[in-house]
Amino acid sequence: MKKADIKEAVENRFRELGAKQLELYPSGICWTMNGEFFKVSTLTDFWVLEWTDSYSYALNYCFEDIAPMPYDITEEEIIWQVDKLLL
C-alpha cells in the first residue's frame, strides 16, 4: 500500500473506534482515546504506530512505545493492528 493509503486506513479506524483527533505542536496530528495518545508516521521503508499515556510526551513527540509495520500489508491487517492496540 502507498503511504497515504496506510495513513488514511489507520486514521479511519481510529475514528471508527472513537478516538479523537487533536493537533499537538510540534508533534502534529495525534489521536487520543482512553487517556492514551497515538500517532501514525510514514517513513521511507516502513510505517509506525506510536503511543504514550503521557500528554507531555505526546506534546513533545516523545512517544514511549512504537510498532513498526511493513508497507506490504493489507487493509485488513492494518485494522487488526490498530484494533490490537486500541481494544
Image (spheres, rainbow, N blue to C red):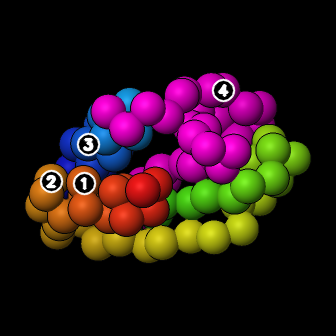
* Residue 18 vertical position relative to residue 41 in the rendered view, above or below: above
> Does residue 19 belong to the magenta stretch?
yes
Q: Quadrant of the C terminus?
A: bottom left
Residue 61 visible from this viewpoint: no
Element under disc 1: helix
- Three-letter amino acid code at the position of disc 3: Ala
Which one is in front, 6 or 16?
16
Element under disc 4: strand
Taking the spot 73% from the left edge, 55% from the top edge, the residue there is 53
The residue that mark 1 highlights is 79
N-terminal-most mark, 1 or 3: 3
The residue that mark 2 highlights is 75
Taking the spot 24% from the left edge, 54% from the top edge, the residue there is 79
* Residue 20 vertical position relative to residue 3 in the rendered view, above or below: above
What segment carries the magenta color?
A: 16-45
N-terminal-most mark, 4 or 2: 4
Taking the spot 62% from the left edge, 26% from the top edge, the residue there is 22
Assess whether mark 3 and mark 1 are in contact (beta carbons under 8 angstroms).
yes
The residue that mark 4 highlights is 23
Which quadrant of the structure image shows residue 14? top left
Q: Is residue 18 left or right of residue 8?
A: right
Q: Measured from the top left, where is residue 41 in percent x and y?
A: 49, 53
Taking the spot 54% from the left edge, 27% from the top edge, the residue there is 21
- Image mark for residue 9: 3
Q: Is residue 24 left or right of residue 18?
A: right
N-terminal-most mark, 4 or 3: 3
Assess whether mark 2 and mark 4 are in contact (beta carbons under 8 angstroms).
no
